[in-house]
Image (cartoon, coloured by chain):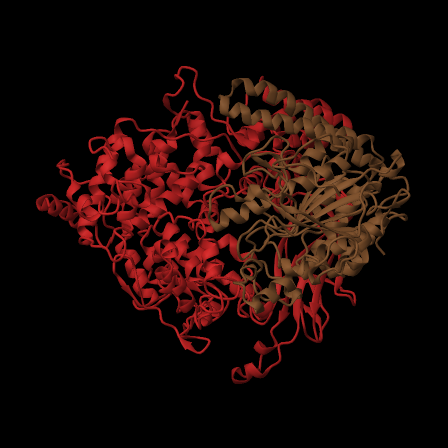
Chain colours: A brown, B red
Amino acid sequence: MRYVTKKHLSRRTVLRGAGAAIALPFLESMIPAGVRTASAAGAPRARFASVYIPHGCVMSRWVPSTTGEDFELRPILKPLEPYRDRLNVVSGLKLPAAYVGESSAAANHGRSSQCWITCAPQGTGPSPTSADQVAARHIGQETPLPSLELALEPGASISYLTPQTPLPMETNPRVVFERLLGDGSTPEERAARQRQLSSLLDSVTDQVAALRRELPTADRERMDRYLSDVRELERRLSLAADSALATIEVPDKPNGIPADFEEHARLMFDLLVLAWQADLTRIATFMVSRELSNRVYPKSGVTEGFHNASHHSEIPANIDRLAKLNEYHTRTTIAYLLEKLASTPDGDGSLLDHSMIVYGSGMANPNQHDHNPLPILLAGGGAGRLRGGRHIRAAEDMPFANLLVSVLAKLDVPIESFGDSTGALEV
Amino acid sequence: MNRPWLLAALCVTVIGGSGAFLYRGLRSPSSTNTNPRWDVLDEYCADCHNNDDLAGGFSFSALARADFGANAETWEAAVRKLRTAFMPPKGEPRPERAVLDATAGWLEHELDAVWARAPTPGTKSLARLNRTEYANAVRDLLDYEPGAIAASLPADPTVGGFDNIAAALEVSPTLLEGYALAAMQISRRAVGDRSMGHSEVRYGAAGGSAQEGHIEGLPLGTRGGISVEHIFPLDAEYELAVQAVLPSAGWANPTGQLVWCDGPSVDAAFNGAPITLDERRRIRMRVPAGPQRITAALVDDRRCAGANELYLGEIDVGGAILGLTIDGPYHATGVGGTPSRRAIFVCTPESTADEPACAERILTRLATRAYRHPVRSDGDELRRLMDFYRLGREEGGDFEVGIQYALSRLLVDPHFLYRFENPPEDVADGAVYRIGDLELASRLSFFLWSSIPDEELLALAAADRLHEPEALAAQVERMLADTRAQRLVENFAGQWLKLRELPDFPSQDRAFDDALRDAFHNETELFFADVLRERRSVLTLLDADFTYLNERLATHYGIEGVYGSFMRRVSLPADSPRRGLLGHGSILTTTSAPNRTSPVVRGQWIVENLLGAHVPSPPPGAAADLAKEATPTTKLVGNTVRERLEMHRANPNCAACHALMDPVGLALENFDLVGRWREHEDGHAIDARTQLTDGTELASPTDLRRALLSRSSAFVTALTERLMTYALGRELDYRDAPAVRSIIRAADPHGMTLPALIQAIVASDSFQKRVK
C-alpha cells in the first residue's frame, strides 16, 4: 500500500512491520540501479571497520587451542563458523597504553576502549589519533563521509580525531539514515535543500572568519575549530553533490532507536553496510556497548547487568554466565555483520571479500581489569590482500598496534609505525 | 586549648539560628581573635599527617603556618574532611564535634581572609548552547516544539555531573551538520512547509501495570492508554492508528477528544464531530495545523455503573494500549494558523513592495531575542538575514520561503549557538571586570530557564539597569515565579538527583514498570519544586515531613489512604523512613545495581552529592586483590550484601575509603533495589547496624537521616557547590571555596532557602564578573 515510488520500497512499510527479521533486507531495495558503488570506480577498494565490545571476555573460551589453519572455534566464536574462511583469530596481543594513568577501576575501564585503536596513553598521541582516523585521512577524502561512527549505547567513543577530540558515535538509526541519504522527498527538493545548506555554511564561514578577530584568544581557538568543522562539512557536501546519490529516491526515515537490542544492532549494521555499498564512506567504527555498561540483555538468558557479570570473581558459575553473554554478543553483532557483508555483492565478489573488520576488546580478563592477552578477530578478504581461516598467535606481549600497522598497510596507508607498535604483525 | 574562643564560636552558632532553622556552622567567627588553633591539628592530625608518615600524601608540619594562601588547596581539603566528620579516621582519638567544627571555622576564616585580598571569579570557556538549551531557545523564540528534531542532535557530554559545562561543549562536523539540518527542518516546520512529504510518528504507551489503572490526566472512567500533544504541521489529512491488544473493542468520546475504549459500541469523535474507524483501528481525517492533544484510553469496565466495589478485583482487565501512530500530512490544503506562525509573522505584506520592510521587521524582532542583544537596522547581522531572505524569496518564489531561509540562517548563527562574552577594550588583560548587562541577562536566563532571555529581561539589560541590585533581585523573583523555572527543576535536580537516569535504568525488579518509574520521577521532581517554590529551608530536602505520592507509589511504600493516579502532597509522621530524599524510590533505585542493592554505590552517591566529600579512586591493585581473595577458600559469597561487604573491612587497602561509603549505604539496607521497605533479604533478617567514622551508631535510614542533619553545614555546602557549578557552567575547585562560603553566608539570614541561595549566587562576583 505504501510505496514512495514504484521502484523503491518505503522504508517505513518495512519498519512498520516491526519484525526485525523483515526489517532489514530493505536496504538493497532502496538503492536504485544507478547508484555509484566502489566497484564501479575500478578495482575494489578495501573497507575498514573496528567493532568494539567492552569488558573483555572469558579468554579460555575464545582462544583456539591450536594455531595455524587447523584449529577449532571455541564456544564464544562458534557462531562465526560459516565465515571461518574469511576469519583470523589473532591471540596474544597486549594493549600497553591502557595500563598508563590513574589506577581506579573506572579509569581503567575507560582506557580499555579509549586506547583500543589509538594505542597511545589517554590524551596523548598524534593527530589523527585512532587507526580509523589515520585511515580516513588517507582514503576517506574520496568519499562524502571520511568515516562513520556508530554505537548501540551513547556516551563513549573509540574514534579519536585528535587526542582530545573523540568523535561522537551515533546511536539513532534515523539520524544515521539522514546523514547518509539526505533530507527531502524529490530530487529537486533535495537539490534545493543542499543548495540552502551550502549557502548557510558559506555564510557562517565568512561570518566566523570576521568574528574571530574580535574574540579573546581562548575563544578564538574554539571558533577556529568551528570553522574547520564548517569547511569539512562543505567538502562533504560538494562530494555528495557529485555522487550518484543525488538521484536516489529517498524513502522515509527510520522512526528512532528500537527498544530491542538485536533489532537495533541489525539496523545499525545494515546502515554501515549501506554506507559501504554506496561508497559513502569506507571507514567505520562501531561500539556494541560501552565500558562499565550495566545493560541487561534479556534475550541472552543472562539476567545480570553486563559490567556486574564481567566481575565473575573466578567462580565457575559466574564464568559460565559471562561466556554466555560473550557468545550472545558474537551471535547478534559480528556474526550478523559478516553474514550481511558476505551476502552483499560488490564488484566481482562480496563486500566481505573487500573489507577488513577488527572485532574485539581492549580488555582481556575483566575480573582482573587486565589488557593482555586481548580477544581480537580480524575478518574479511581485504580486497585480495588478507587470507582467512587461521589462528595466529602473536609473540608474547606484542602490542595490538603491531596488528593495526599491518591492517593500515593493506589499506595503502603509508605508515611504518602506529601508536606504541614495535613492528608489524604480518597477517 | 583556647576554650574562651571556642565558647564564643558556639554562642554565635546558637544565637545565629533563626526560627526552626537547623543549620549550623560555616559562619565566620564574630571575634577577630585568630589565635591559631594549631594545638588541635597537632594533637589529632599530625600523628599521621607528619613529615615521616605523610598520610594521604601531606604533612601539617610542612605547611607554612603564617601563609594559608600558599597551601590553600590542602587546607580546603582539610576543611572538607572536618566538616564531613570523616577525619580523624575511625579508631583514632578525636575531640568533641564542637572542637572540630570550631577548627574548621577558624581555617575557613583564615582562607576567606586570604581570598578577600584578591578575589577571582574564575575562568569560563566560551559556552555553546547544549541540546536542552537549544530546544528551549527554539521553543521560546518561535513557539514551536522542536522535541524530536532537537533530540536527534548528538548528546552533550556530562562533566562534573552536569551537561552545561562550557569547557566540555565542543563542536564537531557531525554536531554542526546536526545544527544545520535542524535549523532547516525547524524553520520549514515553524513557517509551515507545504512541500513536506508525509512521515510517521510513533508514540509508545506506558507498559506494565500502567494499563490496568487510571493514568493521571486521562479521562475519568478510563484506564491505561496514552495521551500526547502532537504538532500537526499542515492543514491536511492524517492517519491516526491505535496499537492495542484487546479482547473486544469500541470507541467512545467522553471528553471531546479521540478516545479509544473497549466496549460494544463503535463510536468516535474528534473535537466533538463523529468519525468512523476502520477494522484496523485506524482513522484518516482532516486535522488543522498546530498542536493537538490526542488521547486513547480504555473504558474501565470495573468502574461502570452497577459494578459493586466489592467485586472489583474479580473483573478481568485484559487488554492494553500499546501505542499511537500518526502519519501524514496527506493532501495538504494550507499552512494553517499555528502558534509558531503567530510568533513569526508579526506583519503580513499587503503587496510585493511591502515585503522587504515586513521581512526586516520580522527578522529584527526574532534576531534580537535569538542573539540576546539589540540588532541594528543597518548592521551586518540584519544584512546577513536579509541576504537569506532574498535567496529564499528567489528560490521558492514567495515571501514565506524567504522568511524560512532567513530563519534557518538565524538558527545556525554563532551568536545564537554560542554565548559570547566580549571584554570591554579599556580593561587590562588579566584584570577582573563586571560583565555587561546584556551578558548578565543571558547568564541569568540560561541559569534559571535554560533558555534565552525574554523581552522584559532584554529591555532592562538594554537600558543598562539590570545590574542594579534591586532590579536584579526583582528579576530573579519574577523568573522563579515563571513557569519556565520548572526547567531549573528538570535540569538541575534532574541531574543532581539522577532523575535523568530513571527512564533507561535497567532495574530487573518486577515492580519497576513505567508507572512506578514515572511516579518515582514525579515524586522527587515535585518535592524539589515544592521546596523551591515554598521557600523551605534546604534542609527540608533531607528531612521533610511530606512527600508527593499517588496510589501506586503509596502502595509501593506501604503508605495507606492514597487513592488514584494523581500525585498529591502527603504528610509523613516523624518516624517515617520516607522523610527526605533518602526515602525516595528514585534515588534508592538509581543507586542500586539492576538486580540487587549496592551499599557501596548508595554510600558513595550520598557522600559525594549530599556531603560534598571526594571519594578517592581505589589504589593500584585493588581490583586484583579482590579477585585474589575470591578464591574458593575465602568467603566472598556471603548470604547478604552486608556479609559480602565484610571483604572491604578485611582488606586495609579497601577499608580506608570503604569505611566512609559502606556504612552510609548499609544504613539504607532496609530499602530494597527499588526502594521498597524490607525486613529480610533471601530469608535473612536485614541488619542495618553500622557505625560512621566519627563513631555515630546507625541502625536505620532514620538514623542516617539524623546523622546527615547533624552535618548540615556539609550538606548546605555540597548543595551550594552543585548549584553554583550548574549556574556558572564550569567545574569548581578549591579556589572557589571562599566564594561558596560567602554565598552561603549571604543566604543564611534569609532562611537558607533555594531562592535565597539562587539570589546570593546571582549577586556574587563569581556570577557577575570575569577575568579578561
Q: Position of residue A70 (x, y in %)?
A: 79, 57
Q: Quadrant of the C terminus of chain A?
A: top right
Residue positioned most to the top? B426
* In the depicted structure, whether residue B563 falls above or below residue B421: below
Does the rendering let one see residue A55? yes
Q: Residue furthest left?
A: B4
Residue B403 location in percent, x, y? 67, 30
- Residue occupying the point 62% across, 24% down: B360
Residue B549, position in %: x, y? 44, 65
- B731 above or below B376? below
* Closer-to-camera residue (B257/B452): B452
Specify whether residue B358 is in view. no
Is residue B712 left or right of B681 when viewed as pictured? left
B660 up-or-down from B245: above or below: above
Q: Which image quadrant is residue B545 in? A: bottom left
Position of B686 with respect to B218 (left or right) is: left
Number of disc labels: 0
Using the rendered view, name the quadrant where residue A259 is placed: bottom right
Residue at screen point 42% across, 25% down: B436
Which corner quadrant holds the N terminus of chain A? bottom right
Please name whichever residue, B468 or B244, is drawn nearer the observer in this view of the structure.
B244
The residue lying at 50 percent from left, 25 percent from top is A218
Which of these two is toward me, A371 or B25? A371
**In the displayed structure image, the side of residue B183 where residue B497 appears, left or right:** left
Rendered location of residue A361, percent (x, y): 63, 50
**In which quarter of the view is residue B262 placed?**
bottom right
